[in-house]
Image (cartoon, rainbow, N blue to C red):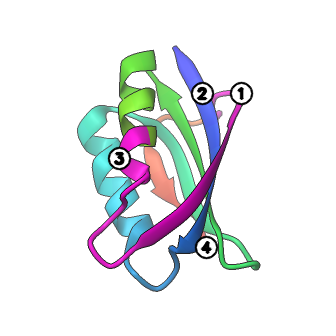
Amino acid sequence: MAAKRLILQGEVQGVGFRAWLVAQAEALGIDGWVRNCPDGAVEALLSGSTDAVEELARLCRRGPPLAAVVSIVEELAEPPDQPGFRMRP
């Protein structure tokens, strides 16, 4: 089991990034959440098998078609309290 917190910066808000990430996480069996940050970044908590978390982190480097990810900060995190993957406001 692995858990990571990601901060994604670039053209990541207003391009469907959160909805895309929910779909990708559900397909990989990842628990956690994703939300927009006031500074224009997107923050996500990913938790699941090490392989699935690493795969989703890799997919986030590209993101959905309209996104332009400039940088990702990754750090180890505690897993979420609830199962499933959700979009936070």
Could you tell me the amino acid type at mark 2?
Answer: Ala
Name the element at disc 2: strand
> Mark 4 or mark 1: which comes first in sequence?
1
**Magenta residues, as a range?**
58-81
* Location of residue 89 with respect to 27 vertically, above or below: below
User: For the point 55% across and 57% down, which residue is it?
Assistant: 34
Checking the image for residue 59, the label placed there is: 3
Residue behind mark 4: 89
Could you tell me the amino acid type at mark 4?
Answer: Pro
Furthest-bottom residue in view? 14
**71 and 47: which is toward the camera:** 71
Q: CA distance from mark 2 to mark 3?
A: 16 Å
Q: CA distance from mark 4 to mark 1?
A: 21 Å
Q: CA distance from mark 4 to mark 2?
A: 21 Å
Marks 1 and 2: in contact by CB < 8 Å?
Answer: yes
Could you tell me the amino acid type at mark 1?
Answer: Glu
Please state the horizontal and vertical placement of residue 46, each as a whole percent of the image.
53, 38
> Which quadrant holds residue 55?
top left
Q: Nearer the viewer, mark 1 or mark 3?
A: 3
Residue 21 included in the magenta stretch of the image: no
User: For the point 30% across and 49% down, which residue is it?
Assistant: 24
Residue behind mark 1: 78
> Mark 2 or mark 3: which comes first in sequence?
2
Marks 2 and 4: in contact by CB < 8 Å?
Answer: no
User: Neighbour class for label 3 at 10 Å: few (<14), some, many (≥20)?
Assistant: few
> Which quadrant holds residue 63?
bottom left
